[in-house]
Amino acid sequence: MNFDDTPEEAKFRAEVRAWIDANAPKHLDEMLSTSTMGRSNIDPEAFRAESKAWQKKKQEAGWACMQWPTEFGGRGATPIERVIWSQEEGHYGILSGIFLIGQGMCGPTMMGFATKEQNEELLPRLASGEDIWCQMFSEPSAGSDLAGLRTRAEKDGDEWVINGQKIWTSGAHYCDWGILLTRTDPTVAKHKGLTMFFVDMKSPGIEVRPIKQVNGNSDFNEVFFTDLRVSDAQRLGDVGQGWIVALTTLMNERLAIGGGMATGFPELLSFVQGLDFDGTPAIKDGAVRERLADWHVLSAGLKHTSSRMISALSKGETPGPEASIGKLVAGSLMQEISLYAAELQEQTGAIIDTETAPFGGRFQAMMLRSPATRIEGGTDEILRNIIAERVLGLPADVRVDKDVAFKDVPKGA
Amino acid sequence: MEFDFNEDQKMLRDTARKFLEAECAPDKVRAILDDDSKTYDEGLYAKLVEMGFTGAAIPEEFGGLGLGYLELCVIAEELGRALAPVPFASSIFLAAEALLIAGSDAQKAAWLPKLVSGEAIGTLAMSEGNGVPSARNTDTRLEGGKVNGVKAVVPDGASANLIVALVRTSSGDSAKSLSLALVDASSGVTATSQHTVDPSRKMADLSFDGASAELLGGEGEGLSLLEQILDRAAVLTAFEQLGGATRALEMGVDYAKERFAFGRQIGSYQAIKHMLADMYVSQELARSNAYYGAWALSTDAAELPLAAATARVSGTQAFQHCSKNNIQTHGGMGFTWEVDAHLYYRRSNHLALTLGSLRQWKDKLATQLEKQNQAA
C-alpha cells in the first residue's frame, strides 16, 4: 500500500509538470483559484476565449484529448496518464469545462458510429477547441426517463425532417455541433423507436433560448427544432438503434477521478479557522467541531475512494463500482456545507455580492449552484437506482411502459 | 500508486474468510451470546492462534510472524465480518500494542509471546465509569508495585490475565499525574461481569485490591501513551467494523431479493433499494477511510492521528448504519432472536462504545483538523 508513482508514471508526471509550468496561463491564477462551482469571476465570453486559447496550446503540443487516438487530434494515452495529466493541470483544468461534453461524450460517440471522413473532418477541430459540441438528449417530458423523448424525426428522401424541443442543453448557445437523439418510430416500444444524429447548430430550423437558472446564470438552454433538415449521412447508427448509441455516449461520461469532485470542505475549514463567535474561535465550538468531523469523514472518504480508483487504473484494471458514489456524495455535501457556512455568517450570509459578502461570497455561489449537481447527469435518485441495480444486483422497478408502443404510453402534460 | 492490499494480503484475506466461515458460523456466536457462563469461544481462539493470526503484526523475536499491520488489518476485517466471539481485539489490538509502544524489552519478552500463543489474554482498562478518562476522574492508584481501585466495563475483563490500566501515580488534576500500569491479574483482581448490549463480547468491572503491577512506559505519560494505543486500535477496529458493515449490507441485499410483497421482490421498491444504496455508500466511504488508516499505521505516518480518527468515525457510522437498516429491511423478522440481524446490530453498538464514543472521536478529529490547518 503506497501512493508512489511507478518509474514510468513518475517520468510522465515530470514531463507534464515541466510543460505546464512553461506554458500554463498563469495570468489567470487569481481568477481560477478564487472561482467556485457556479461562479468564475470573469465574464462568460472572456472565459470561453481563455478556454479556447489553452485548449489550442495543449492540442498543438499533444496534450489534448489524452485518450483519443492521435489521428483525431488526441494523444493515445493510457487512463492513468490522463489521471496524472489532470492532477498536474490542477485549476487550469477548470478552463476545459466547456469542452467536457464534446470531448468526453460526443467525440467517442462519433468515433463509434460516424464515417472515417466525417471524423477526420470534425474531431480534430473538437480536440483543438476550435469547435464546441453539445449533447441534446433531455426534453421537457423526458429527463430521468430519457427514452420517453418526443422530438420527432421523419424521413423525406435522403433527409430527415426534425421537429420538437430539447432542454437543459449545456452550452447550446455557443456550440458549433451537437448530437441529437430523436424518435423515428412511435409505434414500437419506447427504447426501440429512437435514432441518433449529429447536427450543425447553425442550421436553419434550430432556435436556442438560454434558460435563466436559480443562480442567475444561463449555462443551460432550450433548443427548438422547426422543420430542421438533416442529411441521412449524419445519422449515427442504424434507424431504431438510437438507444444503443446513447448508452455509448453515457458510458463515456467522465469518471470523477484525478482531482475528485468539489465538496466545499477545504473552503469551509479555511473559513471556520478565521472565524470567531464574540471573541471565541469558532473552531472551539462543539457544534462546529461535530460538523467538521462528519464532513471531513465524507470528503476524505471521497478522496481516498478516488485513490483506490486510480490504483486500479495504474494496474491496468477498470475501476470498480465504487466510482458511482462520487457525485451522489459530493452534491449533497456541497449543498449542506454551503448552507451551514452561510448560517455561521449570520445576517451577512444573505449577501451574495462578491465584493461585500463574507469569504468572497463563495458559499452563496455554492448554495445557489449545488441544487443542480444533485440533478444533472443523473439525479440522486437515479444514481441510487444505479448503485442498487448494477452494483448490488437488486431487481429493477416494474416498468408499465416496457412492452407498449410509445404512442400508447400514458403521458401527462 | 498502489492504494490497495497486495496479492499476498488478499490471499490472506481469502484464507481468513474461508477459515472463519467454517469455524465461526453464527451458531458459534450465539453459543457465547446465549451463555453467561462462557466468556469467549476458547476453541475458536486456539485455532486463530494456530493459524498465526494473533502474531501477524508482532515481531518474530517475541513469538509473532512479523508480517505487519496491513496483514493484521485484513484479519481484523474478517473477524468483524464473522462476529468472532473472541478477545482478539482486547488482547492484540490493545494489550499487545500497548506493550509494543511502551513496553521495556523485559516486559515485551515476558508477555508478547504469551499473548501470541493465547496462553495469556490481555486487555486495556481505561474508564472508571464517568466520561472520557482524565486525571479528574481517575482514582485507581499505583503505589509500591500495587494497584488499588476499580475500572468499569472493561472488554474481556473477566478473561484477562494481563491488564494495561490507566492509573494515578501522583496526586492532582495534571495529566502528568497519570501513568500506565501493567497489571498481572493472577491475584488481587476481581472481575464482576456486566450485562451488556452484546453478550457475544463480554465485559466486566475490575476491582484491584493490591494486585501486582509495574509501570508501563514513563511515569506521567499515561494519557499520551493511551492516545497512541487508541489511534492504532482505532484503525484495526475500523477494519473490524468494516467487515461487519459489509456483511450486514449483504444480508439486507439478499433478503430484499428473496422477500416478496405486493407480488414483487421488496428490493424492487425504491424505498428499500435506496436505503440499501445509502448503506453501500457509507460502507464504501468507510472502506476508503480504513485503507488510509491502514496506510498511516503501516508506515507510522505523521498523519496517523487524523487518519485513525477518520477511520474510527467512518467505521462506527457505517457499521451502525448498515446493521440498523439491515433489521429494517428484514421487517418484523429482523426483530426476532432467531434471525441473525440483531447479532450485527449488537456488535456495531458494542464496537461504537468500547474504544471511546463517536462524540469523543469526532472531537479528536476536529483537533487534528485544527492542527493541520495551523500547519498549512
Image (spheres, coloured by chain):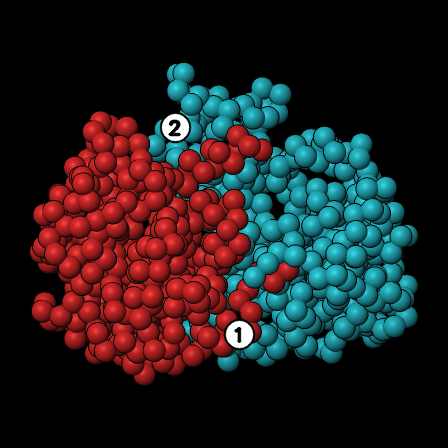
Chain colours: A cyan, B red
Mark 2: which amino acid? Lys
Choose top left, top right, bottom left or bottom right for residue B258.
Answer: bottom left
Residue A12 percent location from the top left of the image: 79, 57
The answer to whether residue B306 is left or right of residue A237 is left
Q: Is residue A212 above or below residue A79?
A: above
Residue B185 percent location from the top left of the image: 17, 56
The residue beneath circle 2 is A284
Residue A49 percent location from the top left of the image: 82, 39
Question: Which residue is at 16% across, 45% downward?
Answer: B146
Question: Which residue is at 83% across, 61% downward?
Answer: A74
Q: Are marks 1 and 2 in contact (CB under 8 Å)?
A: no
Q: Which secondary structure lies at badge 2?
A: helix
The crowding category of the residue bearing disc 2, from other C-alpha atoms within 10 Å (few below 14, some 14 to 19, many at least 20), is some
Question: Which residue is at 25% across, 50% downward?
Answer: B182
* Closer to the camera in the image, A384 or A77: A77
* Closer to the camera in the image, B362 or B123: B123
- Does residue A53 show up? yes
Kindly identify which chain the residue marked by label 2 belongs to.
A
Q: Is residue A368 above or below residue A72?
A: above
Which residue is situated farthest in the bottom direction here? B22
The answer to whether residue A71 is left or right of residue B366 is right
Residue B2 percent location from the top left of the image: 61, 62
Kindly identify which chain the residue marked by label 1 belongs to.
B
The residue beneath circle 1 is B8
